[in-house]
Image: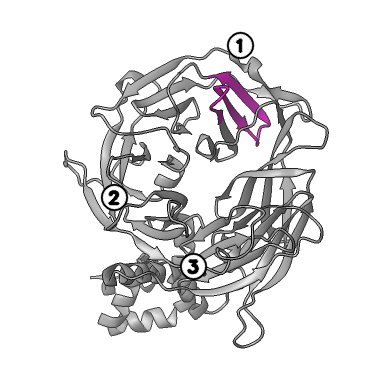
Amino acid sequence: MLQNLSAELQLLIIAELHPVEIAHLQQTCRHFRDLVEAFSRTIWKHCLRRQSFESDVFWPTYKDLKEGSEFKRAATSATQFSKAHADAARRSEPIAAYRRFMRLPMDGDKFRDIYLVQGGRFVMVFGEKRVTMWEVVPPTEEGSEKLELNKILSKEVDHLQQVLATTIVDNQKIRALIVLEPKGSPLSIYQVLEVSFSETEGQFIATTSSRLVTSLDFIAVECLQFVDNAVLFFDEDEKITVFWDTARDKYASWKHEGNLPVLGIFVDNSYTHIFYVVPEGVVADEIPPLRPVVDGRPAVAAASSAVSTKSHKWLHKDAYYFDATNSTPNFVGPEVMAKTTRVPDPSSLYFQVREIVPSKEFVRLRAFKFAFDPKDPLQTVPQLVDTTRFEYPEEIDLQPVFRRPCEGSLATLWLDLADVVTQHFITIAPPIETPPGSDLPPQKTLPLVQFNPSLEFQSGPAWEWEPFYEFDPVSGKLLILHGFLSGEPSVELYDFL
């Protein structure tokens, strides 16, 4: 049937297929094998572009690719990582990885954070005085394990203290929410740093937003979210919520009246309500009118309690063990779930919460559908749509530290902090799918796959900070940064492909 279509339509259809399906076509039909080989660059570039969008990959990662084989290699990297994970699970063995290392040249600057940009080609290093973007280059000497770094971009910043969040926007921009604390000032300054690649100039450029000055510290990761051109904050101690539209340079802040512990927050598609996920269900506040941000002047303080807003509350139909203790990593919001959910109702919002159960021999995740109608908010009910369990043979204390979408699945890096030597695990949860007409939510039981990094840094001298982790399943890379009390930070980069 497909062969009866025009060549143009055949190419469009093939390029929309999964890499495994394209390979199957090539193996089972000579016509399609010849077609894919003849238009290899077109097909694999389109396939890679689509996958990059689905997995939030930074598209300029691939700006220098030219040949069809290069696009194919990049387009199939996520599939290869998933296969390596599945093979390790089937053998009940740790997943294998090739280790390399690199040193970060700080040039006298104080290290603050590191970010492995989705795509695996670039890393951003955040220092107190400047932010530097590096291209990670394979070793020039055969047999060497030391990676080279090629400086792409450097931008000065004013006493950067912390990086609260990073994200990829439209596959073309890197956004980081940074906190600046000039010496002698009791205030915290929040700013959005954006990096993009200019086709006309042929180089990367960095810009910053205006400054939102506050007397509060928004440091709880689960209570912060990028939303298109806006940032959403929630201060658990002061119960202050901030919605900051960085594009229009306007914001709203108010005091959330709820007294329940908040597991996570998100916003509806029309930007009219903020939702607070609590152990019993979901609470919503209407967003008050936005006000202009005056750059350099205090904007958000405890005085936000003077702003009033309407609230709604919805309870779960069943009781779950959603403990707010150590809740930071236990919530996955709609911005990630949208990439890992295949359901017939794309207008609904989805979120996932880890359920704390008495047994420590498995992890249970609950995913909910939240179909919110601002015209009739009382009809909204959180609906359980998926339950996923990850089992392991012994009692360990797992904490998720990194999540990324990968080909529609959700890849997670877990740490067991209870042991003397930290254990590492990786899970891949398939997309959430609700069959039409099904009343019972699907239940899946999946394995934990162990990953054994080098023990050199764990048995070395004292550290100036705890290890930093960055995980990019699409390129099959895991970064671990650790630093001695003196010297440059040392980075290990593990390649699973």
Q: Is residue 189 above or below residue 48?
A: above
Q: Amino acid at mark 2?
A: Phe
Label annotation for residue 306:
1
| Mark found first going from the N terminus, 3 or 1 | 1
Magenta range: 234-255
Q: CA distance from mark 1 to mark 2?
A: 45 Å
480 sits left or right of 406 in the view: right
Q: Look at label 1 and name its amino acid.
A: Ala
Estimate how packed mark 2 is, as few (under 14), some (14 to 19) or many (20 or more) residues with alpha carbons within 10 Å: many
Residues at discs 3 and 1 in contact (Cβ within 8 Å)? no
Residue under numbered circle 2: 362
Disc 3 to disc 1, C-alpha distance: 51 Å
Give the quarter of the figure containing the C terminus: bottom left
Q: Quadrant of the N terminus?
A: bottom left
Sequence-wise, the earlier of marks 2 and 3 is 2
Q: Secondary structure at mark 2?
A: strand
Q: Which mark is residue 453?
A: 3
Image spot of residue 157 (x, y percent): 78, 47
Q: Mark 1 or mark 2, which is nearer to you?
A: 2
Task: Work out whether mark 1 precedes mark 2 in sequence or the reverse, and give the earlier one.
Answer: 1
**Farthest-out residue, bottom:** 142
Residue at left 64%, top 80%? 139
Q: Is residue 3 above or below residue 393?
A: below
Q: Is residue 239 magenta?
A: yes
- The reply to whether residue 121 is in sight is no
